[in-house]
Image (spheres, grey):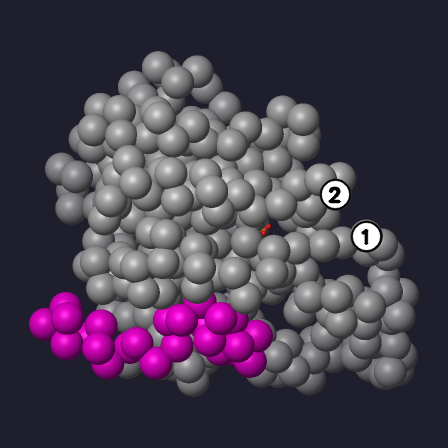
Amino acid sequence: MIVTTKKLFEHAYGKYAIGAYNINNAEQIIGLFKGNIKSQAPFIVQISKGARSYTSTIMLEGLIRSADAMFPEAIFAVHLDHGDEKTCYDCIESGFYSSVMIDASSESYEENVAISKRIADAAHAKGLVVEAELGQLGGVEEHVSVSESEAKLTDPDSVKDFVSKTNVDSLAVAIGTSHGAFKFSGSQSLHFDVLAEIQKRVPGFPLVMHGSSSVPQDEVARINAAGGNLKGAKGVDDNQFKRAAELGVTKINIDTDGRLVWTRVHREYFLEHPENFDLRPIGKVFMEEYANFIAAKNEKLGSAGQLESVRKFLS
Ligand code: G3H
Ligand code: 13P
Ligand code: ZN
């Protein structure tokens, strides 16, 4: 069942965070649904601009609708990740998405306010909800590359003004995380002090943490042992998710860790089976491993076991 994040966030606020997982293909989608059912968690299917163009929006939408039919127990939102203004309008008009992110964080404060407000107005008119971003994460994502020195933590003093002027429904905040597999080079770390200040300014308002992959070191070691080269990869300690949730974070974005599962599974499999050229045996292993990864992550987020309570809350 596709829902907006509004009620999901109300249910989660202060207690746990909901996993927002980026997907691109059938194997990821099936693994995602299986893992969330296995751990009895509500979740957010997160679609980037790159994912929309990888196969096509029609294909991706069809795969998600099919997964919804295959797993009727599932409760999830369909969310555009890091949208620009045009892509947000496309998704709002599509009738399929329940939530969009407008990422105008690289613009000036005034421009960010103006663009985010336009999207919030358009989305609300169609019953969708909107996430905006204030401050700037480090790392690379599709249309923006931000170096560590350029990354800007969210200024708690501007949060209330931003939220009231834009009327957005949730806010991605920069508290020291960054996108990709190489976080916390140099002296970066999570700034819970900043998060606590933000929560004080907007109590009860849902916050979002991007760049939250944990980049497990055993996963990195296995990838490197099977021919990979990810030296120095490092992520967020997922034991910190619950603390973030207590401070108002209701959505935690994870993409890189899923890519690492894919890389490890395929590298190891083809190293062990050099004679094989069939995509299905390894596809099956990946779906299973991806489902296990999602279920384990939901335990860390605290969303595991919440599905029936969410269902009652929604009814
Ligand atoms: O924050 C960005 C996500 O990791 C999506 O990555 O744009 O390469 O699909 P992508
Ligand atoms: P990671 O690169 O840490 O997985 O972050 C993903 C993300 O923030 C997607 O919006
Ligand atoms: Zn992100």
Callout 1, which amino acid? Gly
193 in the magenta segment: no
Q: Which residue is mark 2?
A: 185
Most frequent secondary structure within the magenta stretch: helix
Residue plotted at (28% across, 70% down): 75
Vertical placement of residue 111 versus 6, above or below: above
Instruction: Classify mark 2: residues with Cα within 10 Å, few (<14), some (14-19) or many (20+).
Output: few
Q: Amino acid at mark 2?
A: Ser
Q: Residues within 10 Å of mark 1 (few under 14, many from 20)?
A: few
Place of residue 16 in the rendered image (x, y in percent of width and height, measured from the top left)? 36, 65
Residue for point 48% across, 54% down? 253
The reply to whether residue 242 is in sight is yes
Instruction: Answer left or right for 72 relative to 136.
Output: left
Q: Is residue 4 left or right of residue 28?
A: left
Does residue 5 lie above or below 128 as drawn? Answer: below
**The C terminus - image quarter:** bottom left
Q: Locate the N terminus by quadrant.
A: bottom left
Instruction: Specify the label residue 232 is tagged with.
Output: 1
Which residue corresponds to the image point at 53% horizontal and 43% vertical from the top-left?
191
Disc 1, disc 2: CB below 8 Å?
yes
Residue 170, compared with residue 226, is above or below; it is: above
On whether residue 294 falls in the magenta region, the answer is: yes
Residue 309, quarter of picture: bottom left
Residue 49, given in percent of the width and then of the height, sits at 49, 42
Magenta segment boundaries in residue numbering: 291-315
